[in-house]
Amino acid sequence: MAPRSRLVAFSSAGALVLAGALCAALVGGLTGELLALVLISVGLGGALLLVFLEIGLGEERDLEREAEQRRVRERQHVVERRRQWPPRWPRRPD
């Protein structure tokens, strides 16, 4: 997820929470309460989902980095094993 889209997503969630709080303060009666409840719930729920997304993406980046390090170690290990053993001479037929 690009940093700009991350910023837009979190800002949108914050704007929904703010709009819900304004509705609770400015709109009276049952309508204001329902608008506040819905907007704040959607904003906080969206923020929570975005946090879980960030955690998941971070874990995937870590797994990819570990896999790349493992591939590099395996390549180095194969090269070291080739250097370690001298070439064998072919056997003479009996």
Image: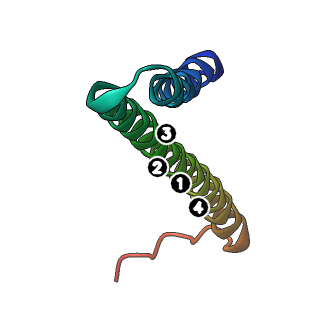
**Alpha carbons under labels 1 and 4: distance apart:** 22 Å
Callout 4–callout 3 Cβ contact below 8 Å? no
Mark 1 lies on a secondary structure that is helix
Q: Give the label on residue 47, or none.
A: 3
Residue type of the residue flagged with mark 2: Phe
Check the image and name the residue furthest to the front: 29
- Numbered label attached to residue 52: 2
Camera-near label (2 vs 4) is 2
What residue did someone put label 4 on?
74
CA gap, disc 2 to disc 3?
9 Å
Position of 32 relative to 60 (above/below): above
Sequence-wise first label, 3 or 1? 3
Residue 60, position as x, y percentages in the image: 49, 49
Query: Mark 4 falls on what kind of element?
Result: helix
Left or right, 67 with respect to 31, comes to: right
Q: Which residue is mark 1?
A: 59
The secondary structure type at the circle numbered 3 is: helix
* Image position of 72 (left or right of 49): right
Q: Earlier in the sequence, mark 2 or mark 4?
A: 2
- Using the numbered discs, state the Cα–Cα distance from disc 2 to disc 4 in whole angstroms: 33 Å
Q: Name the side, left or right, on which 50 lies relative to 11.
A: left
